[in-house]
Image (cartoon, rainbow, N blue to C red):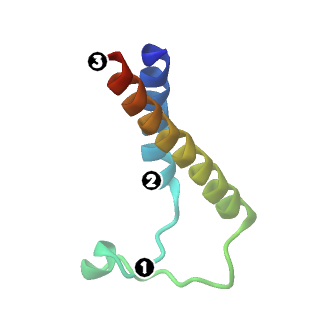
Amino acid sequence: MILTFSILLAISSLLMIVLVLMHKGRGGGLSDMFGGGVSSSLGGSSVAERNLDRITVGIAVVWVVCIFALGLLLKVSN
């Protein structure tokens, strides 16, 4: 069981990194300090961006559940 949650945690961690990097920058961050804030936002976010947001939140929930499950399993096993 611990091995299963560990593997799921590793996969969800890698997916979180990839998904966060795929998001479009919204400005106001470090990129603006170095001249990267030239793009303009026209209207709301696209359907693809909203779906990417939903997938990212879902993977984040899986990641948090894995953290708690591993914490509880490791506490019980000791």
Secondary structure, mark 2, is helix
Cβ–Cβ under 8 Å for marks 1 and 3? no
Task: Using the image as rendered, state which of residue 33 and residue 9 is in the foreground.
Answer: 9
Tag 2 residue? 21
Residue 18, horizontal then vertical, whole percent: 47, 44
In the displayed structure image, the side of residue 41 where residue 54 appears, left or right: right
Give the residue displayed 51% in from the left and 49% down from the top.
19
The image shows residue 6, relative to residue 46, as above or below, that is above
Q: Which mark is residue 78?
A: 3
Identify which residue, 69 or 41, lies in the foreground. Answer: 69
Closest to the camera, between mark 3 and mark 2, is 3
Whole-number angstrom distance, CA of label 1 to CA of label 3? 47 Å
- What's the residue at 48%, 75% (across, down)? 26
Residue on which disc 1 sits: 27
Mark in the foreground, 1 or 3: 3
- The three-letter code of the residue at mark 2 reads Leu
Which structural element holds mark 3? Answer: loop
Which residue is depicted at the point 47% across and 54% down? 20
Q: Looking at the picture, does residue 78 appear above or below residue 53?
A: above
Where does residue 3 sit, x and y in percent of width and height?
Answer: 43, 14
Name the residue rendered at 41%, 30% in the picture: 72
Residue type at mark 1: give it.
Answer: Gly
Sequence-first tag of 3 and 2: 2
Residue 71, position as x, y percentages in the image: 37, 32
Where is residue 75 drawn, in percent x and y?
33, 26
Mark 3, Cα crowd under 10 Å, few <14 / some 14-19 / many 20+, is few
Which SS class for mark 1? loop
- Binning the other alpha carbons within 10 Å of mark 2 as few (below 14), some (14 to 19) or many (20 upward) gives few
Q: Of 27 and 16, which appears nearest the observer?
A: 16
